[in-house]
Amino acid sequence: MTVLIAGAGIGGLALGLSLHQLGIPFRIFEAVAELRPLGVGINVQPHAVREMHDLGLAEALDATGLQTEEVAYFSAQGGRIWAEPRGRFAGYDWPQYSIHRGRLQMLLHDTLIARAGSGVLVTGAAVTDWSGRDAGVEITLTDRASGRVTGRATGAVLIAADGINSTIRARLNPAEGPAHWAGVMMWRGVSEGPRFLTGRTMAMAGRKARKFVCYPIRDLPDGRCLINWIADLGFPPDHDWARQDWNRQGDKSDILPHFSDWRFEWLDIPALIESASALWEYPMVDRDPLPHWTRGRVTLLGDAAHAMYPIGSNGASQAILDARILARELRDRGVGTAALQVYEALRREPVNALVLANRGDGPDKVLDVVAERAPDGFADISEVMSRTELDAEARRYKAIAGMDIEALNARGPLVLL
């Protein structure tokens, strides 16, 4: 009856916590030898925060991240296009959080170990193969550094939460090939800087081919804050992104010239880039939606199932929702194929639609529309794009992402205890 989970990222750990809450045995196998708080900032949306509250993590989450008050869009000249409140400030019953991804992962990890014991997590053990065994599966564990097989484990089902480069997804879909590139490279940095706008604002400026996103992820004692930021630049189709290290150190000189005059009343973008304490360069990639996630006693979860562009702040949130719904079905239908099939039926098509919406720039599409209509800026946004248009774009994305305020507040919990 044991659930085997490949990957101790946000999705895998959230699934482990959910299974423990429901009394279902599980083990998590993680390829890296030691989990560390790596990465940069992300946002966790109210529909996922609700699930973390139901896992008893409300106080810990509030101590780890900052409650996002608003999202605001600006032109490349710094003109304010659109802003709307977020989380509780928008009327949700739960907050939205801006948070360091690694700190969120370690919060989930530490809580899981405290509740379930260290034996539920095996590190330095990549799941590289599996086979059917009686009424379950047997997995092969490998040390990634040496390639040496280190052991095997058996369970009732296998859940692949092993990320965008999932070994299990690749085996289930051998003809899929590499990830899909958006034609955009991202430089992701962390800098100390002044509090800007509300002090809890996620700000986005520019357009798809030259965009800057920033938001605070931690307050500092001197009245300043730690700011997570992303600089996007578009490249031609023949750019050799595939041969670049997806986790390589970035070079400020590659992006500063493109944002050198972005000194706005609310924030000095060149100064923020210059002061970065850490900088990485990534291609913006996702994967094509799949027609199936489940084969027999194996299914996909999180980025392994639906890696999406980091637009609309939904990647981690959707992984948490996957985990909660899958755990519920494993409890209600038994730890077997029926639960996996119902989980996929509930999740695959809605999340596939979100992947495609993000390819179309999701809620950030307003930046492209305004840049096309007013390339030199504007004095009054209402002369460029009406409030009705702006509001319609925001509502459309919320509906696709399952973030409609009234619907979320009105429905019952995903997991009834």
Image: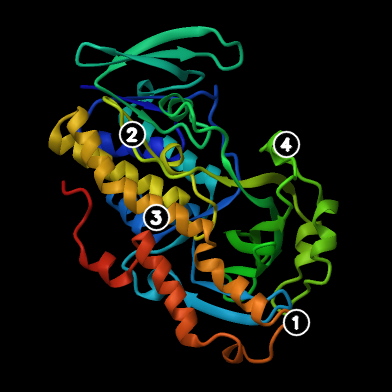
Mark 3–mark 2 Cα distance, whole angstroms, equals: 26 Å
Marks 4 and 2 in Cβ contact (< 8 Å): no
Q: Identify the residue under disc 4.
A: 244
Q: Is residue 89 left or right of residue 83?
A: left
Q: How far apart are marks 1 and 2 (CA)?
A: 51 Å
Tell me whether the residue at label 3 lies in contact with that at label 2, contact meaning CB atoms closer than 8 angstroms. no
Residue at the disc numbered 1? 376
Looking at the image, tell me whether mark 3 or mark 1 is earlier in sequence order: 3
Circle nearer the N terminus (4, 2): 2
Mark 1 or 2, nearer chain start: 2
Q: Which of marks 1 and 4 is nearer the N terminus?
A: 4
Q: In this view, does 225 lie above or below 154?
A: below
Instruction: Residue under label 3, please give it.
Output: 353
Residue, x 38% and y 38% (percent of image)? Answer: 301
Tag 1: amino acid: Asp
Gap in Å between the C-alphas at discs 1 and 4?
34 Å
User: How would you rate the neighbour count of disc 4 (Cα within 10 Å): few for under 14, some for 14-19, many for 20 or more?
Assistant: few
Q: Which residue is at a point 37% across and 62% down the rendered structure image?
A: 400
Q: Is residue 73 above or below residue 332?
A: below
Give the label on residue 16, or none: 2
Quarter occupied by the N terminus: top left
